[in-house]
């Protein structure tokens, strides 16, 4: 075989090898193209079927591309969105919000978001959240990528909540006015009742001590008049106290008050009632230096009220334990624990309601259902707190806390 023939054979072999390589490359390109088409189709499916609206907008404001959700949100076919200005679909008073958001994006390069209203084709304004970011288009020119999320329902709920809050505020103001009017009425009426009642009690006492003395029958009638009169006067005084506290007219003289002096005075005042009921009272030894920030007269009123309740609603030959200790180095807690019948948990929530005696009105024990409420309001007015712990069948522990006075 000649030299030329050998060379030709080698060239043919090389051509065949290159042809095979080209075929393999073409096959690989076809496979890559097919995969690219599948990926592109999947991308467009995801893009079109996304639950939020996607828009591509040129820097001059014209819409370049839209998905189905954005078109449906605006009520316009996608073909009618392209090459139209986005501002055409934004409510006019809020177009400045969009322009400001877009300007910040272009100036800072950072994604921006805002909330505004867009117009549906039927003229209805919808609230959307607009997220804007910058990207590079197919021609290497910058474009804006917009995400539109429908927040109309959220805005509607927020508006409903605001309206409800306004209604609640209005109702609260009306309730406060009604409560103020009630307090003023009670205060005025109580004063009007107390004047003639004092006259009734005064003349009844004069008749009781007159000469010649009243007959036994008259004496019994006078005793009933005085008993009912004093009870009614106590009730009126309690109402006056409650009304003055609720209206903010209760005058308090805040000072450093020695607890030992208050408890000693209260012990002397309450012991006759305890002896009459055969109830033993145990008072603590209180350091004379222990002082609280309070009104001394009102503080005695609170303690006397708690003690009298603990005695009145105690069992026969029961006991009352008064304790006093410092809490957290800043407050003093005074507790009055009795051995009465106690209260079930469902009644504790009703305990500090005016005129609510929790069924004790049928027990024969006198009371108005106001004293405990007055005591709680007084403690609150003095910057303290009052509460109760009770176990049915074992007794109750009424307590209040007041701030320690600066030494």
Image (spheres, grey):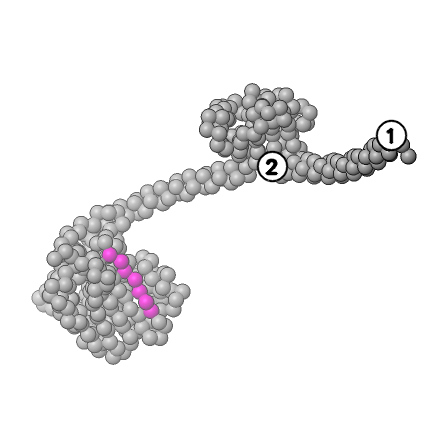
Of callouts 1 and 2, the N-terminal one:
1
| Range covered by the magenta-colored residues | 384-390
The residue sitting at the front extreme is 2
Kindly identify the residue that appears in the image at 9 percent across and 67 percent down: 212
**Residue depicted at 14% across the width and 63% down the height:** 290
**Residue at the location (78% across, 37% down)?**
21
Q: Residue 289, position in %: x, y? A: 11, 63
Q: Name the residue furthest left.
A: 211
Q: Note whether 126 is above or below 226 in the view shown.
A: above
Q: Quadrant of the N terminus?
A: top right
User: In the rendered structure, does residue 385 fall within the stretch colored magenta?
Assistant: yes
Horizontal side of 50 relative to 395 (left or right) equals: right
Q: Within the image, what quadrant is residue 271 found in?
A: bottom left
Query: Which residue lies under the disc numbered 1?
Result: 4
- Report helix, strand or loop for mark 1: helix
Please say whether residue 153 is visible from this viewpoint: yes
Which of labels 1 and 2 is toward the front? 1
Q: Position of residue 407 (x, y in %)?
A: 12, 57
Q: Position of residue 308 (x, y in %)?
A: 23, 68
Which numbered tag is attached to residue 52? 2
- Crowd around label 2: few <14 · some 14–19 · many ≥20 (10 Å): some
Residue 369 position (above or below residue 171)? below
Q: Position of residue 323 (x, y in %)?
A: 21, 70
């Amino acid at each position: 075989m000649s030299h030329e023939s050998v060379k030709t054979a080698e060239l043919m072999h090389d051509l065949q090898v290159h042809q095979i390589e080209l075929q393999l490359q073409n096959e690989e390109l076809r496979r890559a193209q097919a995969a690219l088409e599948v990926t592109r189709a999947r991308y467009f499916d995801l893009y079109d079927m996304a639950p939020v609206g996607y828009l591509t907008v040129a820097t001059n404001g014209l819409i370049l591309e839209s998905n189905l959700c954005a078109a449906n949100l605006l009520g316009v076919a996608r073909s009618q969105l392209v090459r139209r200005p986005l501002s055409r679909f934004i409510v006019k008073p809020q177009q400045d919000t969009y322009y400001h958001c877009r300007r910040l994006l272009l100036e800072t390069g950072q994604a921006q978001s805002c909330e505004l209203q867009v117009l549906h084709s039927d003229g209805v304004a919808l609230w959307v959240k607009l997220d804007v970011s910058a990207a590079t288009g197919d021609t290497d020119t910058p474009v804006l990528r917009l995400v539109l999320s429908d927040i109309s329902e959220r805005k509607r709920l927020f508006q409903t909540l605001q309206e409800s809050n306004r209604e609640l505020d209005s109702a609260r103001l009306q309730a406060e006015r009604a409560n103020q009017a009630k307090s003023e009425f009670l205060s005025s009426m109580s004063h009007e009742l107390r004047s003639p009642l004092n006259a009734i009690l005064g003349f009844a006492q004069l008749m009781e001590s007159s000469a010649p003395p009243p007959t036994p029958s008259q004496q019994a009638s006078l005793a009933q008049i005085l008993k009912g009169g004093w009870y009614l006067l106590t009730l009126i005084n309690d109402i006056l106290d409650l009304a003055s506290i609720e209206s903010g007219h209760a005058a308090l003289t805040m000072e450093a008050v020695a607890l030992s002096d208050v408890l000693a005075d209260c012990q002397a005042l309450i012991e006759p009632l305890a002896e009459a009921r055969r109830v033993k009272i145990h008072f603590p030894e209180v350091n004379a230096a222990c002082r609280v920030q309070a009104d001394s007269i009102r503080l005695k009123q609170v303690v006397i009220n708690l003690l009298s309740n603990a005695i009145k609603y105690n069992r026969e030959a029961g006991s009352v334990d008064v304790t006093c200790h410092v809490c957290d180095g800043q407050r003093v807690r005074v507790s009055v624990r009795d051995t009465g019948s106690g209260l079930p948990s469902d009644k504790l929530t009703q305990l500090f309601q005016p005129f609510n005696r929790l069924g004790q009105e049928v027990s024969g024990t006198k009371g108005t259902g106001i004293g405990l409420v007055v005591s709680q309001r007084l403690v609150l007015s003095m910057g303290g707190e009052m509460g109760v712990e009770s176990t049915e069948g074992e007794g109750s522990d009424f307590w209040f806390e007041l701030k320690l006075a600066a030494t």
